[in-house]
Image (cartoon, rainbow, N blue to C red):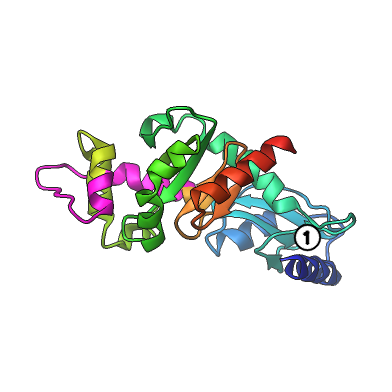
């Protein structure tokens, strides 16, 4: 990761040579990114001269002043003892705000002695999602409340979209999720809430989720992939001390 970060930064610096405008051409940037399905909601200067930070519905991209060159990836600052992931820091603040008001749509498995709350984007067809779900008692015993949002990895083309919609449409979504994760969910008579599922899927994309499970910590930090309960608790304790 450190090597990738330094390479990304070096590439960004090199690309500034292609910037032909004296100042950012926001109209050109918006037009060129929108043509790629990356319509920016904001454009601001990045720490790299000649490159701009564009916040899109797929996360942050770094784009040249004329919009002709862009980088989709993480930007690192490599001036201290350890590289600092500037993209992750910025997205964490954004993600924390995006989760506000979503609580009523989450499927929650609360810890009795709650110390931490982790939001998980999940897909019922994902093997590691099922593994994580089977260990919810371990997370709860570790003081970690697990909150689910939906992220069918294929979006509207997902074969399990109706199943996930039915989970969110069930009278007892937590039990429906339990059944779906162990392969016994019967969705007969349940009206799928695919609208809720797709809303959450789009939220995940905007937060930078690209696979499942994806864990979002209370400060908005996105952790991709399955984390065993002891490892996650250790990580959370470490962040709490920093």
Residue 8 on image: x %, y % = 76, 68
Q: Identify the residue at image location x=78%, y=58%.
A: 76
Total number of numbered labels?
1
Q: What residue span does the magenta drawing correspond to? A: 177-203
Name the image quarter holding residue 18. bottom right
Q: From the image, tell me which residue sits under label 1.
A: 65
Q: Is residue 193 visible?
A: no
Which quarter of the rendering shows the C terminus? top right
Q: Is residue 51 magenta?
A: no
List x then y, in percent, for residue 65.
78, 60
Report the residue at 80% width, 67% height from top: 6
Residue 161 percent coordinates (x, y): 28, 55
130 displayed left or right of 224:
left
Q: Secondary structure at mark 1?
A: loop
Closer to the camera in the image, 156 or 221: 221
Identify the residue shown where x is 80% and y is 65%: 9
Q: Is residue 196 visible?
A: yes
Q: Is residue 107 above or below residue 180?
A: above
Residue at left offset 83%, top offset 70%: 10
Is 180 included in the stretch rendered in magenta? yes
């Amino acid at each position: 990761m450190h090597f990738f970060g330094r390479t990304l930064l070096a590439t960004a610096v090199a690309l500034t040579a292609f910037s032909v405008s004296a100042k950012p051409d926001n109209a050109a940037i918006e037009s060129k990114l929108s043509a790629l399905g990356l319509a920016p909601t904001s454009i601001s200067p990045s720490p790299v001269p000649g490159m701009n930070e564009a916040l899109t519905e797929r996360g942050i991209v770094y784009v040249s002043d004329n919009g002709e060159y862009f980088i989709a990836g993480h930007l690192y600052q490599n001036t201290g003892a350890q590289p600092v992931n500037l993209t992750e820091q910025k997205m964490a603040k954004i993600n924390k705000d995006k989760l506000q008001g979503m609580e009523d749509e989450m499927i929650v498995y609360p810890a009795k002695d709650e110390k931490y709350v982790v939001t998980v984007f999940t897909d019922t067809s994902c093997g590691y999602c099922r593994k994580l779900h089977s260990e919810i008692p371990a997370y709860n015993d570790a003081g970690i409340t697990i909150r689910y949002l939906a992220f069918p990895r294929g979006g509207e083309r997902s074969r399990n979209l109706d199943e996930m919609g039915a989970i969110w449409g069930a009278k007892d979504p937590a039990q429906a999720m339990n059944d779906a994760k162990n392969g016994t969910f019967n969705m007969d008579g349940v009206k799928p809430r695919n609208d809720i599922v797709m809303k959450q899927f789009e939220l995940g994309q905007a937060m930078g989720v690209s696979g499942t499970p994806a864990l979002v910590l209370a400060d908005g930090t996105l952790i991709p992939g399955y984390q065993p309960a002891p490892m996650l608790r250790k990580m959370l304790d470490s962040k709490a001390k920093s």
